[in-house]
Amino acid sequence: MKRLVRVALAAAIALVALSAAAVIAGVVFLRSTLPRTHGRARLPGLAAPVSVWRDRWGVPTIRASSMPDAMMALGYVHASDRLWQMEMRRRGALGRLSEIFGPDAVDADFEQRGYDLESLARKDLAAATEGVRRAVLAYAAGVNGYLRSHTFRLPPEFLILRFRPEPWRPEDSFAFARLMLLKLSVSERAELDRYDHFLRLGAPRALALMHCEPNAPADLIRPELPEYFRAAAPLHARSRSARPLSDPQPAPGSNCWAICGSMAASGSPILANDPHLGIEQPSVWYEAGILAPGLELRGLTLAGLPGVVIGRNRHIAWGITAHQADDQDLYIERLDGSSPPKYLEGDRWIPAVARVVSVKVRGATPVNRVLLRTSRGPLMPPDPGSLHPAMSIEAAALEGGNPIPAFWEICQTRDSRGLLEALRGYSSTTLNFTYADDAGAVGFKTAGFVPRRRAGDGRLPVPGWTGAYGWDGRIPSDQLPGRSYDRGSAEGIVVTANNFLLDQDSPTYAGEWAPSFRADRIAERLRQRRNWTVEAMGSVQSDVLSGMARRMVAAVQRIVAGRPQGASLPPQVARPLEVLGGWDGNMLRRGPSRLLEELTRELVERVTGDEARSAGGGTLVGPFGLLRLLEDPAGSDWFDDVSTPRRESSFEIVSAALASAYRRVVTQCGEDPARWDWGQVHQASFQHLLGPPTHLARWFDLGPVGMPGDNQTVNAQAYLVGSPFRIVHIPSARVLFDLADPDHALSVLPTGQSGHPLSPHYGDQLSMWAAGEYHPAPLTEAAARAVAVETLILTP
């Protein structure tokens, strides 16, 4: 018996040892897939050796003897740190996700194939100038050089999904660039939301919701509406069987500003930019410095593209925000019953352009579908689940040019005049470019494709069959908004924050503009002092005072103050009102901010939830739409609960919401407002595509991190009302540049430089980003070498 025990014990020990050895071997193997960041590595095709200096945050500065060598090295380091991300961007652009993820991605692939970015990318490459072609070809060669030397040492995602990436093509960069700008435009989603409101709520309520939008025009009755209502009416009775309404999405936004040297301690302009985008892991951006003859760059790059998108060279710094002009239009189409169908235009039936597309599917046979196109753009088939009829889409990101050439020219410009000239060649999704140069000039210029419409303003889908609607080219670049100040300006401040920028000299066009809260607060902060430094400017990017919260509290106070004469306030209403009344509106991680947001959640449900349920469920308004309803409650029937026989007043609804929100906060956090934890529920989670809901989340995901702020603070941490209070849009990077010194700059990413979960740079910037801290971002060779902790020499 003892012998059996000893044998069993020995076997158990051996099994544990083997398991430990397997784990150790696995870890050793996975670590072998980390990129080399020091020593020497071969990159065939280089004309001369290239140095890559990395600082303690893993940020590379590339020193090359020529532009093509610099772009080859950039492609190499992008692939070494972000190969999986590049593969997802390429497959997302080309509609090839099903090849690795299986049937769940088929519909998304066909939707993307409808845009046919593959064909557009081939045309973009053929039309590119010689300089752009050389840069893109060299970049692709660098990516492929890394792939050839790491055939058996690919990042973990490729090992888990058991596939190898194909060689990178120059067309892949052009396709991804168009995808990025297609995703930046929010007009299509906004038009569909308005369409759903008309379809399910009826015209009066739909128009009332449009009046709640920022900068809504006074007259919202358009010539197309009568025809549009008649087309939609037969479907209204089936609205209860449709999918729930989509939650109002916070639009991707950004902040960018510049001040003249007269307001800076250095005497030269300072530029700040923090683009707000959806949460991704790895981070959206990749920091890099690039030094070569005629090319000195430092800033934010996108893995998959050559050059710098946001940053500076020796003479000028630039940043971008989404202008959010309405640059996508939807056309309701009438189709006959033929196959492929014809669509009506005027009095003619025109055959739709048809092409058979085959999508390869992992673990299944390929799926073939016929994709259609009208003269206006890709045709989206009817969607019974949403009650949407067949619609075609016209989009600036498809009709205009590729952004790569304009950004490449910006990288090489020497002053503000050169940048403005480069922007004449930019004709995609509209962006605001803010700039500052070492001659003292600051300014902004809107650039891109703003359509010139034959009729309507683009805010709603329109009947395509009448022939009355469509685009006749675009508004000339020199007619789009812009402003500039020279060195002599006493108080030159330029701010763009997705807000309404049109002035009396601008042509009139529609847009999905953001409220002005962020822009107003930035300007207010900048005027509070005159000796700004980049270090002090970081406090503006982290500012969480909410103008929207202040207005929300004031609106609630007015409604309660207007209660029927003699009506008393119970303690559960008076106490939260007292706390909010003494609050300054700072959306800190702890304090009354938690109560305000719980109240917002309650009011969205109590004011519009009954109408949303009658329309099939979902959410009708976000925080700003709610604010507009609260500020104009007189005569509004939104406060009446349509599910009850009596008519409720605005005072009753607001009082009940106050009591309910206060009760929830006290139950979870106690009665002391100083302990009310907004960061406990308002969190940012950085989820990798392979993380949830699998066991891989512990390896790939970061967070959650409790954050201050709200949808309209400068430090915008935007959440969905329907999924309280999950953050969906964040500052995807923060950069600060002082034009007095090319090495006086700061930056930070939300997580880190590397896309490899075993890298020390996978998440080493997360705590800094959450705390509003930065790391140095020098430009020159001497400064980059001084902070380098690793050096890699790439040799031919």
Image (spheres, rainbow, N blue to C red):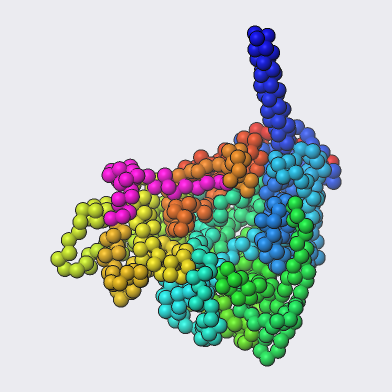
Specify whether residue 126 is painted magenta. no
The count of marks equals 0
Q: Which of 593 and 365 is in front in this view?
A: 365
Q: Report whether 293 appears left or right of 495.
A: right
- What's drawn in magenta, residue-wise? 659-687
In this view, the residue farthest toward the left is 566
- Nearer-the-camera pick, 200 or 205: 200
Residue at coordinates 72% horizontally, 51% vertically from top-left?
100
Quarter residue 2 falls in:
top right
Dividing the picture into quarters, in which one does residue 343 lie? Answer: bottom right
The picture quadrant where one finds residue 232 is: bottom right
Q: Which residue is drawn at 49% across and 52% down?
A: 727
Identify the residue shown where x is 68% and y is 33%: 790
- Position above or below: 242 against 505: above
Q: Which residue appears farthest toward the front when viewing the image?
A: 1
Where is residue 213 shown, x and y percent of the image?
45, 70
On the image, the x and y values in percent for residue 606 come to 35, 63
